[in-house]
Amino acid sequence: MIIKGLSEDKVKAISKIKGEASDVLDYRLKAYEMFKSMEMPKFGPYLDIDFDEVLYYKTSDDDLTDDWGNIKSDVKDELDTLGVIDSEKYLDGIGVQYQSEVIYHNMLKELSDKNVIFTSIEDAWKRYPDLVRKYFSKIVSPGENKFTALNGACFSGGSFIYIPKNTKLDRPLQSYFRINNENLGQFERTLIVVDDNSSLHYIEGCTARNYSSSNLHAAVVEIYVGKNSSCRYSTIQNWAPNVYNLVTKRALVMDNGKMEWIDGNIGSYKTMKYPCSVLKGDNSRGTCITISVAKNNQHQDSGAKMIHIGKNTKSSIISKSIASKGGKADFRSRVEIKESAKESEALVKCDTLILDKDSSSDTYPTNILKNKSSVLEHEATVSKISEEKLFYLMSRGLTKEQAIDLIILGFTDRFKQELPMEYAVELNNLLKQNI
């Protein structure tokens, strides 16, 4: 079944397909009314989206399974070529969304024995409704902007993860998202709860085929980090250059908790994404390390947000942007240290590398400090590859292209250090292909 365009009846149809409870349908309908009345963002890249042409839902021929052998052969072969199937051996669990639905989910038995939950958001609503209801849409509300409202109306797929108290995972959990249909919109909803004294590393991967018409990716991610807990969210989004990537990600961090965003944006036509940590608890920590690559008229508008509420909170935002071949890579941040956040510290550092005269970058920082006992630092640099560096490297036997590759890989080293080895290697390959 394919649902093109959006209306109240079509929102009801999505809910009916999923067999949802009445309160979930009510949530969708209220979000749809908000979507209709809200304007497009007043900042960032111009978004020329014809919402009537978007496919808001496409069923999969594959039912949810934990056995690759049950997945249709052409889909399985495609995922195998992308390296998704092989990556499972490095993980404690993996979920795969193809089009609008999660088709594969598997987790080690020892995690089930520890009462870890890792499943699709739809399955979680049916099996753990009270737990989902406690956290769902409490950190990101549908009324925040047009695309959170759109996600609220037609969310489909995504992951629900619950890490019980006093539980630490040895290896990451991963979700992989694939768009494989022209004009398809993907609206996954991810909800992660890391309860007290626990830890999680979650990895997200995203790809899409390239079409002449646009695809829309408008996801929402909510993360709750309990007391003395930590969560690392690593993502490398390698969307095709026809994708609008418009994502809202936010974490709420309690006492002594730590939230780390490792955020890579490569490809996509236009991106608006600013992972946010709300440091509510005393002594909580938030970090965000991002890399964005823009070329061939792509516009990456990315960055991060840190909101300090608790005492003695600390945050850092480290951003690396690369613009080439007419691309535009902008950095946008918001750091707010509230009056209650006594003795807090925040650091923002954004570096941009512009590779030619046709490319550009702008920086839009917002820094708000509301008490006198805290410190907020901001640094920004914009640079080009110097002829001196090229001459030096070429004098050592490298070609000009090899020298440029080496400089770029060094520029992004801080980001790669935060990735597991196999993903750092993948990032190196993606950078070479996309610059």
Image (cartoon, rainbow, N blue to C red):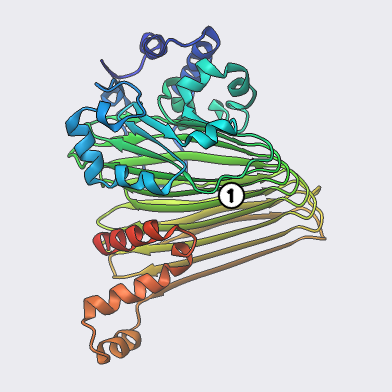
Q: Give me the residue at 43% from left, 67% from top.
A: 352
Quadrant of the snapshot with the N terminus: top left
Residue 431 percent location from the top left of the image: 31, 62
Query: Taking 70 as reference, is 87 above or below it?
Result: below
Residue 274 percent location from the top left of the image: 51, 47
Query: Taking 397 as reference, is 126 above or below it?
Result: above
Kindly tell me whether residue 152 is visible in this rendering: no
Name the residue that disc number 1 marks.
Answer: 305
Residue 394 percent location from the top left of the image: 25, 87
Task: Work out which residue is located at the far bottom of the displayed protein and give it.
Answer: 395
| Total tally of numbered discs in the picture | 1
Q: Nearer the viewer, residue 292 or 104?
A: 104
Q: Give me the residue at 68% from left, 36% from top.
A: 165
Side of 112 where 362 appears, left or right: left
Q: Quadrant of residue 79?
A: top left
Side of 26 where 427 appears, left or right: left
Query: Taking 142 as reference, is 277 above or below it?
Result: below
Q: Nearer the viewer, residue 372 or 109?
A: 109
Q: Give me the residue at 24% from left, 21% from top.
A: 61
Q: Quadrant of residue 382?
A: bottom left
Instruction: Estimate how packed mark 1 is, as few (under 14), some (14 to 19) or many (20 or more) residues with alpha carbons within 10 Å.
Output: many
Quadrant of the snapshot with the C terminus: bottom left
Residue 284 percent location from the top left of the image: 72, 50
